[in-house]
Image (cartoon, rainbow, N blue to C red):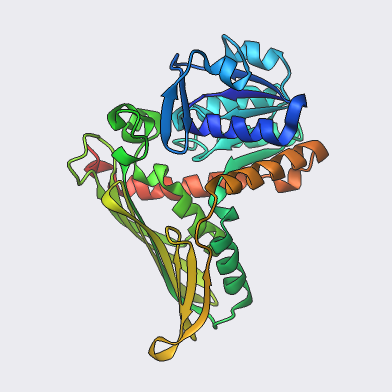
Amino acid sequence: MRALFVGMGSIGQRHLRNFKDLIGPKAEVFALRKTNHSLIIENGSAQHCESLAEHYGYESVATLADGLALKPDVVFITNPSSMHLDVALAAARAGCNLFIEKPLSHNLEGLEELQSVVDSNNLVVSVGYQTRYHPCYKDVESILLNEDYGSLISAGFEWGTYLPDHHPYEDYREGYAANNSLGGGVTLGLIHEIDLVYSFFGVPKTISAIGGHLSSLDMKVDDTVSVLMGFDRDEKLVPVNMFLSYAQRYETRTFRMQFNEGLLVCDLVKNSVVVYGSHGSVLYEKEYGHVDRNKMYKVELSNFIEAVRKQDTSANSLKTGVDTLSIALKIRGKIDEFCD
């Protein structure tokens, strides 16, 4: 299988390693890069090498047209999100299957055209939301679907993290996450949480939000946002809260679901799911301990590769990418004036 990678930052390198591991010696890899750094980025650290191309065994191309002329089976779009769509459209028109890192883009322009080209060319598309492959997610999905503890009353999601800690090998102010022009900001950057909410409850009927650039971080885009969404469930408007922050020094990532017969608490840092009953009784408990994050990426990629081999477009997640982006942009629309 032949792959073209557009972007060779930390996530591009992760997908490249996994792609070569899954495909084996028959993998043909090409890469288009805008920067000339020679950093091997893995497990949150970076080290210099003589040549990334030699280290990973890929062939560099000078332009996107040169890369697409090689007729890759798949194109990995792992550059800044504001640049995703142009690459995706060109690759789709060339008949290439697409793996697009989240978020799908930084606005909705051109997405209808992309969907049309994808449908016309019968392409497989995956938007990278690997948290859906977390074992805790699978547990909660089953509990919610089966209504093991009765109907849902409310839910709350929280992810607080500190942006300068994400890529300690680089100046956070120069990265895409801190720059609006590149598709940055916490709402788009931590869109995984929006995808979790969407995967559990669908598209919200109502959205309100407050937040913006509230911290001392040197960025002119949102670093903190608090959201209240309403979802239609059983003819009731169920409230779901969500808090996202790039300014929280101590990382937390949890969500709660209040059911008629119990309170579910999922901790994606400690990798645990607990359901509490009356007087603190424990109705369900599962602790996974250490979870190999790369395994989630690898399973996600394996599913994509299998779909490409079978040309199974039923597995496409382009609509998911559009829906989660639409929710994120509605949130951003309510706080943009507080981002400068």
Q: Among all residues in the image, which is located at the extreme right?
A: 310
Q: Would residue 69 be seen by someone viewing this image from the given angle? A: yes
Question: Looking at the picture, how far across and down is residue 311, in whole percent?
Answer: 80, 38
**Tag count in the figure?**
0
Question: Looking at the picture, how far across and down is residue 319, in whole percent?
Answer: 61, 46
Q: Among all residues in the image, which is located at the extreme bottom?
A: 279
Question: Looking at the picture, how far across and down is residue 49, in whole percent?
Answer: 47, 17
**Is residue 129 rendered to the left or right of residue 329?**
right
Q: Is residue 217 above or below residue 94?
A: below
Q: Is residue 180 above or below residue 257?
A: above
Question: Looking at the picture, how far across and down is residue 31, in whole percent?
Answer: 59, 19
Residue pictured at 36% horizontal, 39% vertical:
166
Residue pictured at 46% horizontal, 53% vertical:
194
Q: Nearer the viewer, residue 92 or 175?
A: 175
Q: Where is the N terminus found, in terms of image quarters? A: top right
Which quadrant would residue 89 be assigned to in this image?
top right
Which quadrant would residue 119 be assigned to in this image?
top right
**Is residue 289 rendered to the left or right of residue 90?**
left
Q: Is residue 198 above or below residue 272?
A: above
Residue pictured at 42% horizontal, 90% vertical:
278
Q: Where is the C terminus found, in terms of image quarters? A: top left
Q: Would residue 203 be seen by someone viewing this image from the given angle? A: no
**Is residue 311 rendered to the left or right of residue 30?**
right
Residue pictured at 45% horizontal, 29% vertical:
80
